[in-house]
Amino acid sequence: MSEITLYLKTKRLKENKLIEDMAKKLKITPASYSSKENGRTQFKVDELKVVKKYLKIDDSELIKYFFS
């Protein structure tokens, strides 16, 4: 598991969110969200904005894990 996928899963669990919750928020299927969280497919920019807000990810964390 890569650093980013581990971070996302840990952050999601810390916020007590299920894969189904994330998928519903992004208006995608749970399988699609799982693929994104596990690094098999990439998040779109608009999806990242939603994930950032929903999981309370601050800007420095977003940059560290998604853009470094």
Image (cartoon, rainbow, N blue to C red):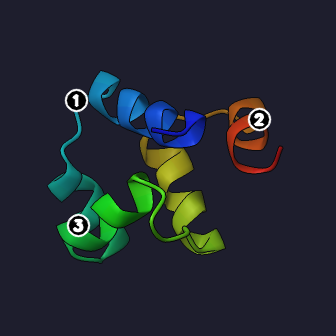
Mark 2 Cα within 10 Å, few/some/many (few <14, many 20+)?
Answer: few
What is the quadrant of the C terminus in the image?
top right
Q: Do the residues bearing badges 2 and 3 touch, measured as CB atoms within 8 Å?
A: no
The x, y position of residue 13, in whole percent, is 28, 29
Give amino acid for label 1.
Asn
Q: In the image, which disc is placed on residue 64?
A: 2
Mark 3 Cα within 10 Å, few/some/many (few <14, many 20+)?
Answer: few
Q: Nearer the viewer, residue 45 or 5?
A: 5
Q: Earlier in the sequence, mark 2 or mark 3?
A: 3
Q: Earlier in the sequence, mark 3 or mark 1?
A: 1
Give amino acid for label 3.
Lys
Q: Residue at x 55, y 47 (%)?
A: 52
**Whole-Å distance between the Cαs marked 2 and 1?**
22 Å
Per the image, the residue denoted by label 3 is 24
- Secondary structure under the numbered disc 2 in the rendered image: helix
* In the rendered image, the vertical position of residue 54 relative to residue 32, given as above or below: above
Per the image, the residue denoted by label 1 is 16
